[in-house]
Amino acid sequence: MNPHLLYAAIDGANIAFLSVLAIHLVTLAPRNRNVQLIVLLAFCTVCAVVSARHSYVEVLPAEFAVDLGPLIVPMNLARNLTSGVVMLLCHSIFQDRKRLPPPLLAVWAVQMSLEEPLEWMAPPAWEQAQPLATFVVFEVVPSALQLVMLGFALIWVLRESDADLVEARRKTRAVLVVLTVAQIVLALLIERLAMQMWALPIDVFFPVHAGIIAFGLLLSGAIVLLLLRPDSVRFVDPRRPTPVDAVADVSRHAYDVARIRAAFESERVYRRRGLTVGALAKHLKIPEYRLRALIHNDLGYRNFNTLLHDYRVAEVSEALADPSQDDTLVLTLALAAGYDSISPFNRAFRSLKGMTPTQFRARSRQKLADS
């Protein structure tokens, strides 16, 4: 079989899968932010596949090459957006209640500037005179910045995975881990950096590129199978609790929900350091899968640690507002509420209250004085 025909078939199948995925999701939820990011990611990937047939024109037969002309500029721009879009998507899905760190947007802006505008403006004479500097500035540095963004994306996907209460989102984590790692290892480390550093001939580059696209085809095919389900939006935007099955045992359901509430409000089980979903399930004698669903569907939480933070910070806030506890250290209150150290408590408190515990205590005293 003609290998170039096989490469073209792989590219075509990849484009077809990504197009079907984008059209399906847009049909279901056109205004959903995560859907829009996935559609943008699919578009960037299609641009990468097509633009490669322009970049490798030297080794492709005429019938398989694509001459994009001036369109190669916006196609390359879209292709190089991929890492930043993956970062935004992972943040949007997994970072509940948190803003995207502004420095990461700056990293993305610098990466894109080096990929396109600055590289276009570089004088050809300088590139010829300083090939190593050119490679570092326009290949190594942008790749390093992309690694930073994808690294954060991977951290967000993996962080608190055990505490995730949304079953659909737990499955989405696995897909995004593979996507992110593949982007890091295959697209950046191998195709962009290692192969150029080894100075391999271009006729070796394209088969490797085709292999990477073939892996992408397997991944995009798996994603399409996952997201072509009628309820596929819940895999990309599990913000709304899943409705409880109407035929469920209502009495048992209500009883279990009441037990969970009592565990937190009466027993103050959240004070136990290192409390996990599994440990709480054993304490309440409720199957872990059912406990996750109950907390998500009935209490409205997508992450178990968020639930713990809410109760722990509420207890400490009440103590900070109590004049009789003015002499009690904030650290003592945090440890009593279930925190292992002051740092995670301070982060959670600032996130929920918009100020430090010390500021909260001072403001509470001021309100008492004014009244």
Image: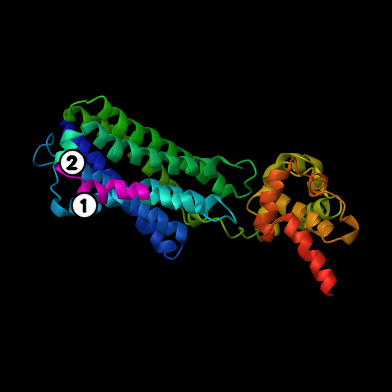
State left or right for residue 255 relative to residue 238.
right
- Residue 89 in magenta stretch: no
Identify residue type, mark 2: Ser
Residue density around tag 1, few if under 14, some if 14–19, many if 20 or more, within 10 Å:
some
State left or right for residue 166 relative to residue 25.
right
Question: Could you tell me residue 1's position as x and y percent?
Answer: 16, 30
State left or right for residue 247 relative to residue 214.
right
Secondary structure mainly formed by the magenta segment: helix
Identify residue type, mark 1: Val
Question: Residues in magenta?
Answer: 110-124
Question: Could you tell me residue 48's position as x and y percent?
Answer: 27, 45
Q: In which quarter of the image is residue 211?
A: top left
Residue at 8 percent of width and 40 percent of height: 62
Question: Could you tell me residue 91's position as x and y percent?
Answer: 51, 51
State left or right for residue 286 relative to residue 115.
right
Which residue is identified by label 1? 73
Q: Can residue 306 be seen in this view?
A: no
Q: Is residue 222 visible?
A: yes
**Number of numbered markers:** 2
- Residue 121 in magenta stretch: yes
Q: Residue pushed farthest left? A: 62
| Res. 82 mark | none
Which residue is identified by label 2? 55
Residue at 13 percent of width and 36 percent of height: 60
